[in-house]
Amino acid sequence: MNTIKIKPYPNFQITEECVQRDIMPNTRPHSEANEREFDLSRPMVMITEFESGDRRVVRPGPAVISDNQKYCSVFPNPVHLFYDSAIEFFNNSEETKKRSFPSCAQKKNKKIGDIHFLDIDADQTHQCYDRFFKLRINSIIMLSTSVEAFINHSIPNDYSNRDHIERYGRFKDKLKTHLPDSLGLVDFWTGKEGMWDEIVTLYDMRNDLIHLKTNSQDGFEAYFEVINKMLEYDIPKSIQVIGKFMNEIQTGFIVFDEI
């Protein structure tokens, strides 16, 4: 499925009036600027004008060092990073399943009935099989993380006990009560039972994977129930529902890339 457009964070529009009143009087020509003042180890504000004439207030992110070179760009919205990661992980898991599995099965394998049993070493599982599960698990964890990060991101700073709620509040309480209450959306969940169920199911799936409660007496049955649930879980549907939820809270928050 398509990835999304990852927007800057923050990303404020700026008017011509503000430019003339507040920016121009406090701007120095580039030749007068001291490059030593360009310190990306602390938060900085950048005003960018695009070819369209649109002006935005954004923030450069920390510099990334590689082979003694520094690279920097505008800081992305972390919620978008989590959500888009979930899509990428799912897409890669599908690619592994459809392309890598048949390729791996042709090398060394045994076929038991209609099932290809991918070869292993004495103390090492099959890398192709492992990769599929790593990607699938990460997709679910990142998607769930994006929801909680979005809730924390959306509750206004002046909301009562906000800091305590963000750090210690129960996920379902934040989702059902604090988020709509803080935004004045009292009846937000009315008529949205399907959306609520999908988000809660995702969160419970994430908890089962993270906490790994085996509910079994021995290692032969451990984790099988939750892994089977994960294989049956409709991740693309969940991604779409989560995107719809975010957009109903904040219009245009999730925008999918065009093919």
Image (cartoon, rainbow, N blue to C red):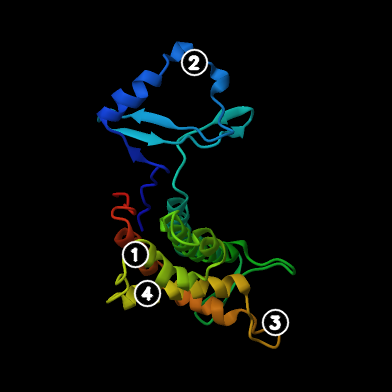
| Kind of residue at badge 4 | Trp
Sequence-first disc among 2 and 1: 2
**Residue 226 appears at what percent x and percent y?**
55, 78
Depth order, front residue of 31/143: 31
Count numbered badges in the picture: 4
Left or right of 198, for residue 213 = right
Sequence-first disc among 4 and 3: 4
Q: Alpha-carbon distance for marks 4 and 3? A: 34 Å
| Kind of residue at badge 2 | Ala
Q: Which residue is mark 2?
A: 33
| Kind of residue at badge 1 | Phe
Foreground disc of the pair 2, 1: 2
CB under 8 Å between callouts 3 and 1?
A: no
Is 229 situated above or below 147? Answer: below
Element type at mark 2: loop
Judge the density around disc 1: few (<14), some (14-19), many (≥20) Cα neighbours within 10 Å.
Answer: some
Depth order, front residue of 79/121: 79
Foreground disc of the pair 2, 3: 2
Q: Which residue is mark 4?
A: 196
**Residue 125 appears at what percent x and percent y?**
66, 67
CB under 8 Å between callouts 4 and 1?
A: no
The answer to whether one can see residue 91 in this image is: no
Sequence-first disc among 4 and 2: 2
Foreground disc of the pair 4, 2: 2
Q: Which residue is mark 3?
A: 219
* Disc number placed over residue 245 in the picture, else none: 1
